Image (spheres, helix red, strand yellow):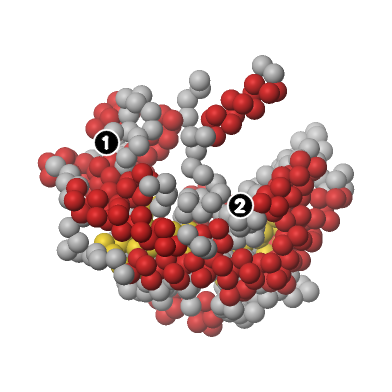
């Protein structure tokens, strides 16, 4: 195929994706609304994409750019001259490395655990799964959804290698009481997950939550979120080099070169790093202050509009640019249907299933590109609520719900899973479903482990060779 034909086909394929610009996809993507930022990031990415971050002595340009980004992040997040860091592929890798560094710094602990609020990002559960660490999940306040300092401290024991808090939590956009938690810890490493808030909260004057809080030992912040850099770039900061040392990996136990890794990856394209370096330098502090203000103003206006709609309420007290809303108990309509109706009107809002005191809800990640379209969003949300109210609640057959709730994912066969996926509308080779309300309602009846397995089977069915 010619290059022209291939790019034409790629454009046709991309036409079926959610839009990444324009503020209509309120999850997964971050849009500054500044076209020159995207163009600069793409150009810088192309210039460095073939360079390899595996060996900084071979590509000193990447070393310079990484140190520049780490220094900028450290200054933003209250770091000192002792603060060090690493650029990673994303927030999950940054969080995983924080757990790995904490575990490997305590070889004396036979069965290490990490203490975190139940609202902490699932990346920490992934890290625990990969690295053989036990999660001690502490319930949050059932109304504010913020971590409870006394309960967090009480969960710490002699096997705890890391305590985690969020700035803010993804699900509800609330800021954990980080100074209060830190004050109750006695020498245990304390990681602040600021992946989504670290590049916006300081510009809004919110905090403290970083190294300006005594006791915070590491902070993660994603640049491909509110620094509006191309994916995927994150920074993991440590208060000093001694804390970072156990994150590194080295192996001379083979006949090739001595492998030295600062992150989970070995070979790393220099493209994302260069793109982030260019965008951060171009936007600058005043630019980020304006972008943060625009996103926050949009979030405030959206919250007011949502709360004015009959039957909806915002969860907790979101302080920055994320929020989640649910339906009143007697609303008489289905929230997942609202999400489908918004999709019909050109908006993507992210469904979240119920968990402990948090009911099923719709999540919004608000960016600077949403400023100016708040009234349109609220009007379409009102129309979507009206359509959902007219359609009525989504009812799952009680016998089906009882059957699903009793299933054991550990004993089900692939054939049984295929049947369940088909019953849920996720199988049979029919392609991706266009409406999800009935599917989500059925999945909501499944216990968490079964829902995980069902969706993993669905994911496996999607990823097949063509």
Residue matched to label 2: 90
Name the quadrant containing residue 426: top left
Q: Which mark is residue 168?
A: none
Residue matched to label 1: 424
User: Tag count in the figure?
Assistant: 2
Residue that appears at 44% across and 30% down? 462
Name the quadrant containing residue 118: bottom left
Q: Position of residue 83 (x, y in %)?
A: 73, 70
Image-based side of 54 in relation to 204, left or right: right
Q: Of residues 90 and 102, which is closer to you in this image?
A: 90
Secondary structure at badge 1 equals loop
Image-based side of 153 in relation to 244, left or right: left
Image-based side of 256 in relation to 232, left or right: right
Q: Is residue 436 visible?
A: yes
Residue that appears at 56% across and 54% down? 30
Q: Is residue 122 above or below residue 419?
A: below
As drawn, the residue found furthest toward the left would be 399
Residue that appears at 65% across and 75% down? 211
Q: Position of residue 404 (x, y in %)?
A: 21, 41
Crowdedness of circle 1 by 10 Å Cα count: few (<14), some, many (20+)?
some
Q: Is residue 263 visible?
A: no
Q: Position of residue 207 (x, y in %)?
A: 56, 78
Secondary structure at badge 2 equals loop
Separation of marks 1 and 2 at Cα, in angstroms: 32 Å
Marked residue nearer the N-terminal end (1 or 2): 2
Name the quarter where the N terminus is drawn. Answer: top right
Q: Position of residue 315 (x, y in %)?
A: 35, 68
Image-based side of 97 in relation to 434, left or right: right
Residue that appears at 33% across and 69% down? 307
Crowdedness of circle 2 by 10 Å Cα count: few (<14), some, many (20+)?
many
């Amino acid at each position: 195929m010619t290059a022209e034909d291939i790019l034409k086909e790629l454009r046709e394929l991309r036409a079926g994706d959610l839009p990444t610009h324009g503020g209509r996809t309120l999850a997964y993507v971050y849009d500054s609304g500044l076209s020159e930022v995207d163009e600069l990031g793409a150009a810088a990415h192309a210039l460095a994409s073939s360079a390899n971050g595996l060996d900084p002595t071979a590509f000193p340009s990447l070393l310079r750019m990484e140190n520049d980004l780490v220094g900028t992040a450290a200054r933003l997040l209250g770091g000192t001259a002792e603060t060090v860091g690493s650029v990673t592929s994303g927030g999950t890798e940054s969080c995983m490395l924080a757990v790995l560094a904490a575990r490997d710094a305590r070889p004396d602990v036979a069965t290490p655990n990490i203490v975190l609020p139940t609202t902490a990002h699932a990346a920490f559960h992934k890290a625990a799964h990969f690295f053989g660490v036990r999660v001690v999940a502490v319930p949050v306040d059932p109304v504010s959804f913020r971590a409870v300092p006394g309960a967090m401290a009480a969960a710490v024991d002699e096997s705890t290698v890391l305590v985690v808090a969020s700035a803010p939590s993804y699900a509800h956009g609330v800021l954990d009481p980080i100074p209060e938690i830190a004050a109750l810890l006695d020498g245990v490493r304390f990681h602040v997950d600021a992946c989504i808030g670290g590049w916006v909260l300081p510009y809004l004057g919110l905090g403290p939550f970083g190294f300006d809080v005594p006791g915070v030992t590491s902070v993660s912040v994603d640049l491909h979120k509110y620094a509006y850099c191309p994916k995927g770039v994150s920074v993991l900061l440590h208060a000093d080099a001694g804390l970072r040392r156990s994150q590194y990996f080295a192996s001379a136990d083979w006949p090739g070169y001595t492998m030295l890794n600062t992150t989970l990856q070995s070979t790393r394209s220099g493209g994302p790093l260069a793109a982030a370096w260019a965008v951060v330098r171009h936007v600058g502090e005043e630019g980020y202050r304006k972008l943060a203000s625009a996103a926050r103003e949009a979030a405030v206006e959206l919250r007011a509009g949502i709360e004015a709609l009959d039957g909806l309420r915002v969860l907790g007290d979101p302080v920055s640019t994320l929020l989640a809303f649910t339906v009143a108990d007697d609303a008489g309509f289905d929230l997942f249907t609202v999400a489908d109706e918004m999709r019909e009107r050109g908006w993507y809002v992210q469904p979240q299933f119920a968990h402990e005191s948090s009911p099923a809800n719709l999540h919004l990640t608000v960016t600077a590109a949403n400023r100016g379209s708040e009234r349109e969003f609220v009007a379409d949300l009102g129309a979507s609520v009206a359509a959902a109210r007219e359609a009525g609640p989504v009812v799952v057959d009680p016998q089906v719900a009882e059957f699903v709730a009793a299933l054991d994912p550990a004993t089900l066969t692939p054939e049984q899973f295929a049947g369940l996926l088909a019953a849920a509308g996720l199988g049979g080779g029919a392609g991706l479903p266009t409406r999800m309300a009935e599917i989500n309602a059925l999945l909501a009846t499944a216990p968490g482990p079964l829902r995980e397995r069902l969706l993993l089977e669905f994911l496996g069915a999607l990823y097949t060779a063509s």
